[in-house]
Image (tube, grey):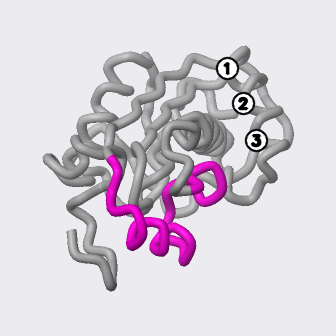
Amino acid sequence: MIKGLCGIDEAGRGPWAGPMTIAGVKLHKDISELNDSKKLSEKKREFLYDIIIKNSSYHIVSIPNNTIDKLGLTACLKNAIEEIMQNIDASSYLMDGNTSFGIETLEHKIKADASVFEVSAASILAKVTRDRYMIEIAKKYPNYSFEKHKGYGTKAHKEAILEHGFCEIHRLSYNIKGINC
C-alpha cells in the first residue's frame, strides 16, 4: 500500500457489448492477495471485492455503450478518470497502461494492475462491477449469452449477432470482422 495513492484501472475497453467500467481506489489498509483481476478467479475477485469496498475510498464509473459510440474510448476514459480524481482526494493518481490521456496530474505505468496494490484493487472493482452488470443484462437478452462471454468477441457472440442482429447494448461503432454495422 502506498500512502495517498489512488490507483485507477478499467474493464471492458474491448468488448463488442456493454459498458466500459473504470474504478479508482485509495486503500486504507493493506489487503493481501491483490493482483491483476485477469489473473484471479471469479470467486477470488468476488471475495476481494467486498474487502476492498470496506477498506478503501473508491469511485466507480460505468460508461454505457452508446456514449462510447458517440464520444470514443479515449474521451470516455479521460472523462471517467477526471470524475474519479474529483471524487477521491489523493496525493497522486496512477493509471494502468501507457498513457495519461492528456491529464497532467495522472501518472501511468504498464502492468500497474499486477504490481501496485491500489491499481490491482481498482482492476478488481472495475471487473467485478462490469461482470455483474453483464450477468444481469443477460436475463434481458438471453439470445446473446452475455453471462458467459461478458460481451467480448467470441465465436458464439458473433454467431448470435449474425442470427439475431444487434441489441441495444452493442457498440455499433466497433468494426466486427464479418459483420456490417
Dot 2 falls on a residue whose secondary structure is helix
Pointers 1 and 2 in contact (CB under 8 A)? Answer: yes
Marks counted in the figure total: 3
Mostly what secondary structure, the magenta segment? helix
On screen, residue 102 versus residue 176, left or right, reads left
Tag 2 residue: 49
Dot 1 falls on a residue whose secondary structure is helix
Q: Residue at x 20, y 51 (%)?
A: 69
Pair 3/1: label in front: 3
User: Can residue 103 be seen from the camera position used here?
Assistant: no
Q: Amino acid at mark 1?
A: Ile
Q: Residue at x 31, y 26 (%)?
A: 83
Q: In the image shown, does 15 or 25 lie closer to the viewer?
A: 15
Coordinates of residue 148 in the picture (x, y in percent): 66, 56
Pointers 3 and 2 in contact (CB under 8 A)? Answer: yes
Q: Residue at x 24, y 36 (%)?
A: 79
Residue 45, which numbered label? 3
Tag 1 residue: 53
Dot 1, crowdedness within 10 Å: few (<14), some or many (≥20)?
some
On screen, residue 85 versus residue 143, left or right, reads left
